[in-house]
Each structure stands twice: as C-alpha cells, then as structure tokens.
Image: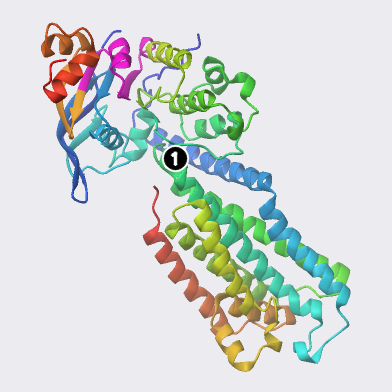
Amino acid sequence: MTAIAAEPARVPPGSKHSDRKNRDSQRSAFRNLVTTEAKLLVREIVPLLWGIGFPMALLSIMGGFSHGPDKSLGGFSLVAAYEPILIAFTCATFALQGLPTVLAGYRERGILRRLNATPVGAGRLLGAQLTVNLSVTLIATVGILIVGDAAFGVPLPHQPAGFIVALLLTAAAMLTLGLLVASVARSGRVAAAVGTMIFLPLMFFAGLWTPQATMPAALRRVGDDTPLGAAVAALQHSMAGQWPPASGLAILAGYTVAFGLLGWRLFRWE
Amino acid sequence: MTPTGAIALEITNLRKRYGQKVAVDDLSLRVNEGEIFGILGPNGAGKTTTVECAEGLRHPDGGTVRVFGVDPYRDRGEARQLIGVQLQESQLPDKITVAEAINLYASFYPRHADTEALLTRLGLTEKRDTRYRKLSGGQKQRLSIALALVGSPRLVVFDELTTGLDPAARRESWRMVKELRDDGVTVLLVTHYADEAERLCDRVALIQSGRVVASGRPDELIDRSNASHATLDDAIVALTTGEAS
C-alpha cells in the first residue's frame, strides 16, 4: 500500500522559502487551469464552430459576392465592410455564449465551491476562463484578418496600434458583460439563453443584418452608443488607417468598467 | 490509532445563520489528531454548515474555528493545505478525464501525493483516460475522494461519503477510511447513517438544531441513552427525540 498520508510540513509556514514555493505552485496551478479550460473548450467543438467557423464561412460568402468599393457601404467593398462586424461577432460569441454558460454551469454543479476549498480558489478559474476566451477571440481575429487579406484583398489594418486598442476594448467590454451574465444566471442553461438574448440586439447594432452605413440615421445614432456599434466603428476606422474616434473608445471603456464592477459585485461562487 | 495529543479541529461557540434561519447555534466540538470523528444528525441539523465553516467556505457569525491552530477563513491558503474535502453534490466538468482532474488538483498543492499511486489505491487506474461524464456513480465518488486526498491533507472531511452507494461500495469506502486513519490522517465524517458511524468512528457528536446534543464514543452514547438499546441508531433516536424505542 502506498502511503498517501500527510507528512507534517517540514517547512515552517510563513517562512520565505515556503512563500516562494507557494507562489511558484500557484503560478503553475494557474497555467494548468488555463490548459485544462482550453482543452475542455476544444472538446466542446460547438463554440469553436460558432465563434470561428461561422464568421469564416460568412467572410468567404461576402468575399464571393464582393464587387469592389460600394458607395452605399461608405466606400468599402462588401467584404471589407463586414470584416469588423465579423470580428465583433467573434468577440461577442465567446464572451456572451461561451464564458457565461461555462461559469454558470460550473457554479450550478458545485465546481466553483470545490475549487474554493483548495488553496488555489475559484477566482483563478475565473481568470483562466477569461484568458482562454480572450485567446481564442484573438486567434479568430487574426484568422479573419489573414483570410480577408490573402483571399479577398481586404488590406490588414492600416492603423495597427489603433486596431489593437479597439479590439482589446471590444473584447474587454464583451467579456465583462459575459461575466455579468454569469453572475445573474442561476444555471448554465439560463446563462446560455440570456447570453443569446443579449447577443442578438448587440449584433444588430454592430450591423450584422444591415451594415451601419446603410442604417437610417436615427438608428445609427442609437447604435453608436451600444457596445458593438461603437466597436465596429472603431475597428473600421483603424482598418482604414485612422485612429479610432475617442468617443467610441470611451464608450467601450465605460461599458467595460460598468459591466466589470457590476459583474464582480454580483458574482456568487455558489 | 495513535492519537498524538494534537487537536486537528477545534470549534468553539460557533454560530451561523442564513437570514432568519439559525443553522448553527453555539456549537462546540474538538477533533483529536488521528481519530475518525463522526458528525451525526438529521437532515437540516447544521452538519454541513458546521463543516463548511471548518473548510473556510463559510464565515462564522460568531465563535472560533481552528484547523491545527489555523483560522480557516482568515488564513485560507495555509488552512486549505491542511484540509482535504469531499463535498456533497460537487461535480467536475463533463469532459475532463480522470487523469487530468487528479493532476490539475495535485498542482494546487505544494506537497501533493503521488497521483498514480492514488489512482491505483482508489481503483481508478483503468479509468484514467475516461471522461467524468462516462464514470459510474461509484467511480465519480472515488474520484472525489482522490481529489480530497491529493493534497496530502492532515484532516479529511467526508460529507455524506456513502450516500447513494451500493452496499459493496459502502464497505469499500469504510475500509478506505480506516486505512486513512491507520496512515495517521484525521477523518471527519459527516453522515446520517448511525451504522456507519458505529462501525467507523472513534467518537461522534450528535447534532440537532445547530447544537451538539450528545458526544462521545459510540458505545458510550448507546450506554447513556438507555441500557436496553442495542445500537447507536436506537441511541440517536432516544437522544434526539427523548423517545425510548
């Protein structure tokens, strides 16, 4: 029989050595949580198809129908007008449909509670989920940019720094909104439903059905103040070579802070 | 069984209420290192709340809790290395494999046990690449025990360890609990099965309405209730309801 009994701690707690060892161990625990959550996401398949496969397919369809610059699309080609919309789609899918479903499901099944009984705590699982969802969002975005450039002649962002700022703020606003959904939803199933209910109007103002340039002026003004309306405008500007409008970035930052604070306050571990 | 004289868990005047409902009301108990201590009582008596305070999952409204002298709520990191838990109704993600789960949890503890040896001990080696969803109820239970032990805890809390298990699996769990004690691990067993407590526990505390109504060795409780009572089960009924059966 292998002894699995505890050996008494040889290192007195609180000593420098044990502190460092604990920190190292916590870091490796976080890495393992991120790896595990990434594996679990890949095994689900559906979120990846929806969050990466669907925008890629849409990009290809738009690319096929695209016939050069179009005045009614603000001088962009169809595929160029849709690229930022598809990037917003990817951000929203992982943040609003992936993240809250998983987190609320973990809470419902006592997984967060169980983690809180370990030295690592469930807060790090939250961090791992945010990391994994942000990572796949960034990977999908790079994929969209590369395919758009290589296959359909949509140039890479002319204002890369502005694009990165706009993209990160978009992802942050969506992920904190996803956290808020996870906070208020009692189960994974409810979180999925609430996430979708929010996703649809947000994507409407992002221009998924009718791009912003073709929206009536009044609707567009409303859309500019929504997270994904502001996001698409900011991404579009930076792709065309301009720094994104400060008002749009401020709106995204404002949503991030508001959703983040509210989500953090309302979040329950069990 | 060689109690070393150290106190594994000391709960003094614990109080915890949820809104208007008092879950634990001035409860005190002491678990010595190296013993199997049973917390017995009817559903809703406050058993789970009491151990959740010991696990640092709940903040007591009053009183003190110490795990090997450490406050489990204030010094979470330290206390949680000392205590391993198997929680009621706690699951794992459907698609995580047995080996991934045990290695992940091992990485949470600086002084963790050998995970392969642990899987062997709990009869899960053949299931190491099986996903959680595909495990049987008994296998899920054994995995949750493995996760409770992977941090080499000095105190293990089993909350409803054998609820829902078939008789063979129950006996297997009992054998494992005794082995743990033989290895020097202190075991806190929350149960509502008197036969289980009578068989396993060195001492028990009987909890009702958030208070300890009786505590001691199982045979002491049987004697104390009434000489004619043959089992701990009878003694519990007598001690909690005042009825002689």
Asked whether residue A20 is in view, the answer is: yes
Instruction: Residue type at mark 1: give it.
Output: Leu
Q: Nearer the viewer, residue B118 or A96?
A: A96
Q: Please indicate, yes or no, whether residue B35 appears anywhere in the rendered image.
A: no
Q: Residues within 10 Å of mark 1 (few under 14, many from 20)?
A: some
Quarter of the view holding residue B53 = top left
Front residue of A258 and B189: B189
Q: Toward the viewer: B52 or B102?
A: B52
Left or right of residue B87: residue A143: right
Query: Which residues are drawn in magenta?
Result: B181-205
Depicted A204 relative to depicted B38: above or below: below
Instruction: List the residue tagged with mark 1.
Output: A115
Quadrant of the drawing holding the N terminus of chain B: top left
Counting from the top left corner in percent of width and height, residue B59 is at 26, 44
Query: Is residue A198 in the magenta section?
Result: no
Q: Is residue A72 above or below residue B213?
A: below
> Which residue lies at the image location 27% right of the left edge and 20% below the top edge?
B38
To which chain does the residue with label 1 belong? A
Q: In this image, B237 relative to A220: left or right?
A: left
Give SS at disc 1: helix
Image position of A245 with respect to B216: above or below: below
